[in-house]
Every structure is written in C-alpha cells, then in structure tokens.
Image (spheres, rainbow, N blue to C red):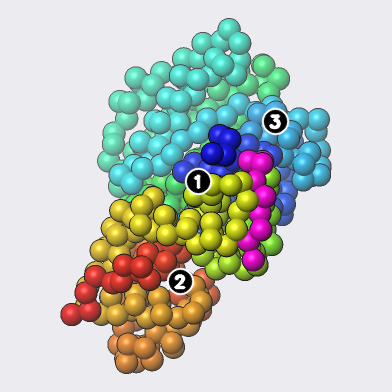
Amino acid sequence: MKPRFVDPFTPNRPVDDPERFFGRAEPVNEMIDSLYQVMSGNPKHTIVTGDRGVGKSSLLTQVHLTATGDNRLTARLKIDRGTPKFDFVTVWHDVYATQSAFDLANAILSKFENSFQKFISGFKLEIDIAGFGKLGRDKQNPINMTQLIDEFVGRMVKINQEARRADKNGILIFIDELDRIRADSMIASFFKLTCERMVREGLKNVAFVCAGITGAIQKLEDEHASVLRTFRDVPLPRFEKNEVAEILRDGFLAANHIEEVTTLAERAWDVTVGLPEPTHLLGSEMLSVDTDGILKDEDFDAAIRKIVTDVRKNKLADLLARAGGGKYQKIVKAIVEHEKKIVPLDYIAKTIGQEQSQFSTNMATLMEREIVFKPSTGYYAFTDPMLKEYIRVNGVLSLD
C-alpha cells in the first residue's frame, strides 16, 4: 500500500496558496496595478470576469492576500508591486441572489464594524449600524437611494479616518459572486453613485474589488448604463493545454508521484477545457485511484470513470435533468456526439435535423439554465466539461 499524502489539489475551494496558483500573470499584474493606483490616491474599481469555474474566486483570494501584505505571488511571478508590500484594510462579502443595494451596503458596514479591530490594534469601530438600519428599504425609491448613499459614504469617511490614523494604504471592499444580483437590485446604481460620491468626499484610497461570471458587467449595465465607466474589467481566460499539464504535474510532484500518462496535456485539456476546477478534480482523483505511486493511462481513465459514476454523479445528473426533455435532449446528445468539447452550431443543426432558427430559443434557454455556454460566435460547449463524459457513460434522459 502506498504511503499517505496530503492532496495538493483543491477542486472544492479557491486556491489560497500562492505557490499553487498558476499562470494568470497578465490578470494578476492588472490587479496589482489597481492596488497601486488605489494606494496612490487614484481609485481603480475592478471586476474580474470569466466563465464559471475559471478561477475568479481564486484570483480574488490571491489579490486579497497581496493587499494585506503577502508577497509570495508577486515574488514568484516577478511582478513589480511599486511598494515593499501593501497594507490595506479589507472586508470580503459574497453576494446572494435576493440581495438589494441596501442589503449590500448594510452587510459591508456590518463587516467593518465586526472585524475592524483585527486591522487596527486596540481600536473598536462603532459606525451606528442600528441607525443605518432605520433607512427606508424601498429600493425603487430614488429618495431612499440618495439617502442610502449619503449614509453609507458618511460611515466610510469615518472608517477611512481611522485607516489613515493607522497608516494603512487605504480600504478595499472585496465582493464575490456579483453575477448573482437581480436586475432590480439597484446595486449598479449603488456602485456608480457611491464611487462618484466617495471621490467628492476625498475618499480616493477606497475601492471595490469584485468578481462575477462573464456578463456580470452587462447585467449591471442593464440597470445603470454608465456603470462601465466605474469598473475596470479584468477578463480571466481559460488555461492553455501546457498550463493544464503544468498544474497537474506540479501537484503530482508535490504528492511524490511519478507521471507517465501518454500526451497528458492533450488528454487533460480535452476533459477540462482549460477550467481550473475540473483540472484540480482530475488531478485529485488520479492520485486517489492510483495504487503504486506511478500515474499511467489507466489511472487517467479510472479517474474519469470515478468522477462521472461517483464523485460528480449527482451533480451531473441534476445538470442533465435541468436541461429539459425532448428537443433539449437532442441538442445535448448532439454536443456529446461531436469529437470535440467545443461544438459548431451548424453541426448541432445537422445532427438534430433542424434549421438554426428553429432551435435558437432552445439554445438561449440552455445558456440561461447554465447547461451550455458560447465560447465564441457559432460555437457551444457544456459549462461543466465532465457532463460530456457523464452522458457518454449513462446516456441522455429521453429523446421523446
């Protein structure tokens, strides 16, 4: 029996170890420049965008570490910080679907009040959350929105005064899962008006650092057309084949395993489509099924089988059920039958025997249900690349 080891892969959580965060040099540099600009009194509000599972939360986590003085990532990537280290006051909030602008503002202030002492030793910040809670909650009322901005920025002024007194670089408000917001949340208006008001109040060392799936900015723009001028969009691409192989091999090495898989880069990219989460899942399960410390083709195949029949079975079954029946299943089956993960729309049309115009609504619905995404015009792929492997083993639900 092989020796026990610590699994170096993290498929179920963001990468929080700078030594295990791969690639992304250009987006990381963009984010570090934003930190430098905020520190220098030139606020750059940013939003990391990309496909689901592409590593947005991992990048946000790494930026948070860097913003609070951890230089490991910038040192490893040889990125100039412009300062020996950053020292920001930070809070982190994950958006939920029913959240309004009022809820978001209240959550941010509550977190400052509850955690400020750990940033500034011996200081107890009191920012009158009870008084803030007396505001009207009618998010469609412009008078209440104006009052919300007045009250929120007024409290941020107080927080900023204490941050300056403690010689901090400034204040960063990290917001993840921004794509969860509803169109009527008024959060876009809150961002736009708050950012403008903070500049007028001299809060130039304060910024929002956000993340959301591609389209989050467009969702914000639907509510407030000029919000695009507020955020600096930092798109996060998928990994290339060599990067996927590098992540896997580095993990195998950390676990003291030898890798002997034929064409690992090509095979791994084919089942992960360059997404970090399934890449980590594949690596973790290859280590799990291996018995002799030498990873071979059969270990790769066994890991895929375990993922689709055990580890990810329920999630993939639910995803397939959510796709719907009838024509939806025919579309899904056509995507599975294509030799590549990214499938041309004309192939789907030919396979199901319909003109593209006859099922365009179905494709839009599958995208809305997050079953498929459109990597480029005229091409589609499953949002979870393992769904294709699952269907190859189990088939579709029904074609009636």
Q: Give the number of the mark in front: 2 or 1.
A: 1
Image quadrant occupied by the N terminus = top right
The image shows residue 360 at horizontal and vertical percentages of 34, 81
- Magenta stretch: includes residue 176: no
Give amino acid for label 3.
Answer: Asp
Q: Residue at x 71, y 43 (%)?
A: 32
Q: Position of residue 229 (x, y in %)?
A: 58, 55
First-in-chain label (1 vs 3): 3
Q: Classify 38 as above or below 369.
A: above
Foreground label between 1 and 3: 1
> Is 136 on the left or on the right of 51, as rendered?
left
Which circle, 2 or 3, is nearer the viewer? 2
Label 1: how many Cα within 10 Å (few below 14, some 14–19, many 20+) = some
- Say few, some or many: other residues with alpha carbon within 10 Å of mark 3 (under 14 / 14 to 19 / 20 or more): some
Name the secondary structure under disc 2: strand
Which residue was labeled with disc 2? 381
The residue labelled by disc 3 is 70
Answer whether labels 2 and 1 touch (C-beta < 8 Å): no
CA separation, marks 1 and 3? 32 Å
How far separated are the C-alphas under marks 2 and 1?
28 Å
Q: Which residue is mark 1?
A: 288
Between discs 2 and 1, the one toward the N terminus: 1
